[in-house]
Amino acid sequence: MNLSEKVRMLFWITSLVKRRGPISLRDINEEWVNNELSENRRFDRNTFKNYLYNIEVIFGIEIIYKNGGYCIADKAKISTNNLHDLLISRIQNIEFYSKFSDLGDKLQVDDIPEGSQYLDIIGQALKENRLLCIEYQKFIDENSKVIVIEPYCLKLKDRRWYLLAKNKATAEVCTYALDRISSLIIEGNHFTPDSTIDVSSYYSNCIGVYADDEKLDDVVLKTTEWQAHYLRTLPLHKSQQEITPCVFKYHVDITPDLINEILRMGSKVIVISPETLKSKIKEQVDAMQRMYINGILGD
């Protein structure tokens, strides 16, 4: 069994136990023999225990024997753990791609263009609290700069990886786009994490990667019924509430990412409040209108 098949098998065990637990090893084997990976082989108890250990190490999910069967030790943790959801999603993708890799052009996915090559190094630095030395160039800068940073959190947004980090020299906390990094190495020194940086909630009040919690606003949007279906199934933010049909309320920071999300919906949404956000959207729409009338791009 190769690595991909083993990961798929561990995912299969986790999903079955989550769905049917407590479930006996006998019942697990009855399900397993119908799987194409089983090759008509069953789990013996010792081998199965080793697989449960691997599941805990790889997925962070503990499966225990209780009430005559195997079950998830802490289902509440699984339902609220974003990392678990991400892992499960990725493994589901691996399973799907491995089964249907021969579809050719019938299977099309978005790639993440740049930055992924640094993930292993950054992951190690995050795990060991190690300083990183990066060469970084903003879009607005003509030249790159070499800086030493304390890494705190990785975030994936709109096909780009971002790294939340603290500049060692200036103590400024910033979000760095990995595709703007031209080189990256781990420094020899460890650092003591800044206790004021709470990575679990740093981005919780914003849409995207621009985080500034100094002033949160109640944002109210009114959409068409067609657009409302999309927001109901894929909320813009965890604070989303549909206060009346097709009217959605959010408690968030007004950031460029929020403005972009609203503009992306085009004529299918209108800002009800606050006035500051309504003005910013109107400025963008007016600028676009002038651009198309005059045929001249703005800054």
Image (cartoon, rainbow, N blue to C red):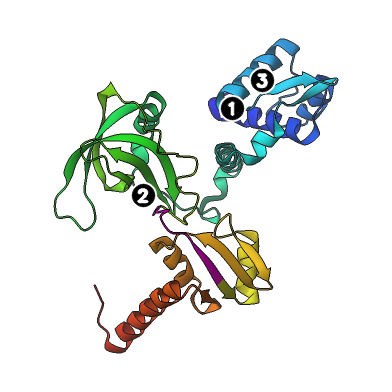
Q: Amino acid at mark 3?
A: Leu
Which of the 4 image quadrants contains residue 186?
Answer: top left
Seen in the picture, residue 25 relative to 269 is either above or below; the reply is above
Seen in the picture, residue 169 relative to 278 is either above or below; the reply is above
Q: Position of residue 206 (x, y in %)?
A: 47, 55
Whichever of callouts 3 and 1 sits on the residue coming sooner in the sequence is: 3
Q: Which mark is residue 113?
A: 2
The reply to whether callout 2 and callout 1 are in contact (CB within 8 Å) is no
Q: For the magenta stretch, what is the residue range?
A: 210-220
- Which of discs 2 and 1 lies nearer the camera? The answer is 1
Whichever of callouts 2 and 1 sits on the residue coming sooner in the sequence is: 1
Mark 2–mark 1 Cα distance, whole angstroms, equals: 29 Å
> Which residue is tagged 3?
52
The reply to whether callout 3 and callout 2 are in contact (CB within 8 Å) is no
Which of the 4 image quadrants contains residue 28?
Answer: top right
Residue 215 highlighted magenta (yes or no): yes
Residue 206 highlighted magenta (yes or no): no
Please tell me whether mark 3 sits on a helix, a strand or a loop.
helix
Q: How many numbered discs, if any?
A: 3
Q: Position of residue 226 (x, y in %)?
A: 63, 74
Q: Amino acid at mark 1?
A: Gly
Instruction: Characterize the magenta stretch by its predominant secondary structure.
Output: loop
Seen in the picture, residue 176 relative to 2 is either above or below; the reply is below
Q: Position of residue 266 (x, y in %)?
A: 49, 76
Q: Amino acid at mark 2?
A: Pro
Q: The C terminus is located in which quarter? A: bottom left
